[in-house]
Image (cartoon, helix red, strand yellow):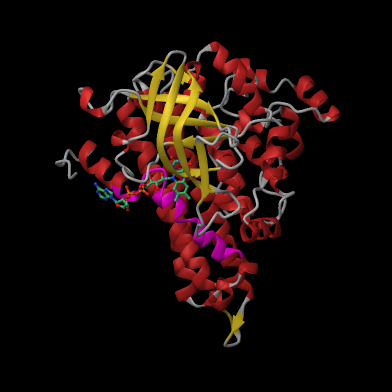
Amino acid sequence: MSAKYSAVCSTTRLFSRYVSGLPSRPRLCRWAVQEHGQQRHFSNGRNHRMMEMSGFSEEQLSVRDAIQKICAQFPNEYWQQHDQSETDPKELHAALAADGWLGIALPEEFGGAGLGISEATMMLQTISQSGAGMAGAQSIHANVYATQPLARFGNKDQLESTIPNIINGKWRVCFGVTEPNTGLDTLRLRTTATRQGDKYIITGQKIWITCAQVASKMILLARTTPLEEVKKPSEGLSMFCIDIDRSNPALELKKIKKMGGRAVDANEVFFDHYEIPANTLIGEEGQGFKIILHGMNAERCLLAGEALGLGYAALEKASRYARERVVFGRPIGKNQAIAHPLADAYMNLEAAKLATYHAARLYDQSKTDKSITPHAVGVACNSAKYIAAEAAFKACERAVMTHGGMGYAMEYDVERYLRECFVPRIAPISREMILNFVSEKVLELPRSY
Ligand SMILES: Cc1cc2nc3c(=O)[nH]c(=O)nc-3n(C[C@H](O)[C@H](O)[C@H](O)COP(=O)(O)OP(=O)(O)OC[C@H]3O[C@@H](n4cnc5c(N)ncnc54)[C@H](O)[C@@H]3O)c2cc1C
């Protein structure tokens, strides 16, 4: 057990927090391993044993056990209802915050657990796999990854005033990058932040901003130097951690009606001369793109984990149904036309799992091991997100088809999983752009756009 881990998991400290019920850092402690060490699978069903767990670290296994216990309070019916009523799953956010999980990958000096993206990916996979799907994962996703650039490049005042409030659940966070007119061409985004004395004035539009209706803070990427005045489009962008003041008429949020993950909101956001204090700038002005890159690879890993969770959840539902549903006097799973696609989906998920946790490990190790290049990390994280999203899609599609007509019924959940599994294929970067990236950066083919 590493020194860092031991420090996080001081048995006495965590035990006393456990007994008193006080909010604490994640309960990643020895007692958790001892208490559940013999049965490292989820308590609420065999689905979570489907994924082969060999080779994961003690930390990852402990995360999985503890998060599963929290998620067990939120059954599939909770997610069905929240999806149908488009109601924010604030109880899950609160439960995770109460036990300190929102700070899993944030620095210990500000109340975080100081663990890595390898553990955070396991956390988000576990949430998704519990039946919460993308909606559950997305309700806390930005708190975990959008805060990474803030933690790394923010100044002491910014960190002291924000990070503890994000970890304790007082403030939720959203991430404002995508724009309607520029889409994946992020470097050409048009939202401007213009310095005026001790303020910046924000004008422009963002789209698809998840959780903006419930967040207190937005990590915003905006242009501070016009595109025409910079040498490269990656220059002149800046990152801010801003308040979302919904009472300010200079800020407007419009909810987008969407296909899946309806429990979490997604929004158009309009800034019309919205004033923010100059001290909300993260790092140096003009360095926003470099700063944001720091969070992007982490986000790819988290999304890959979320996709895996959805895929395994769907596959378990499908295999259970295939064992139990009898037609023509035999379980439908006896037909190879049903069994083989499920076996194929399983192997795809297992391969994606290896790619995902390999990428997360490279991401974490690259912080101290300088032989791991940013290129290697970027390729691994992008590849993992692509492979996991495709594997999840295959599993979810097969799960619906295995259920026949019942696959279309809300009660069986797989239709919800299928609707949600498009998200990791599209966001935060589409599968086509990952193929472009690998073609250019690995295969050295001419850039196509
Ligand atoms: C549910 C959901 C939640 C989201 N949450 C957030 C959020 O919280 N914050 C945020 O900032 N954004 C968020 N997004 C936005 C998301 O990151 C973008 O939708 C995604 O990056 C794709 O951008 P776009 O929709 O503008 O697609 P476009 O850029 O319009 O692309 C459309 C299609 O064209 C393809 N295409 C474009 N250019 C090329 C090319 N050169 N070569 C090949 N194919 C190409 C794309 O792959 C895609 O299939 C979210 C999106 C969704 C659906």
Query: In the image, what residue occupies the spot 49% across and 17% down?
Result: 154
Q: Does the magenta stretch mainly form a helix, a strand or a loop?
A: helix
- Residue 67 percent location from the top left of the image: 67, 41
| Residue furthest out toward the front | 249
Query: In the image, what residue occupies the spot 32% across and 31% down?
Result: 376
Is 242 left or right of 168, judged from the image as shown? left
- Residue 198 percent location from the top left of the image: 47, 13
Q: Quadrant of residue 448?
A: top left
Is 423 left or right of 112, judged from the image as shown? left
Q: Nearer the viewer, residue 65 or 230?
A: 230
| Residue furthest out toward the bottom | 328
Query: In the image, what residue occupies the spot 46% across and 52% down?
Result: 423
Residue 201 appears in the picture as rendered:
yes
Quadrant (top left/top right/bottom left/bottom right) for the N terminus:
top right
Q: Is residue 259 above or below residue 132?
A: below
Span shown in magenta: 413-432
Q: Is residue 232 above or below residue 123?
A: above
Q: Nearer the viewer, residue 111 or 331?
A: 111
Q: How many marks?
A: 0
Is 50 left or right of 448, judged from the image as shown? right
Is 37 left or right of 271, judged from the image as shown? right
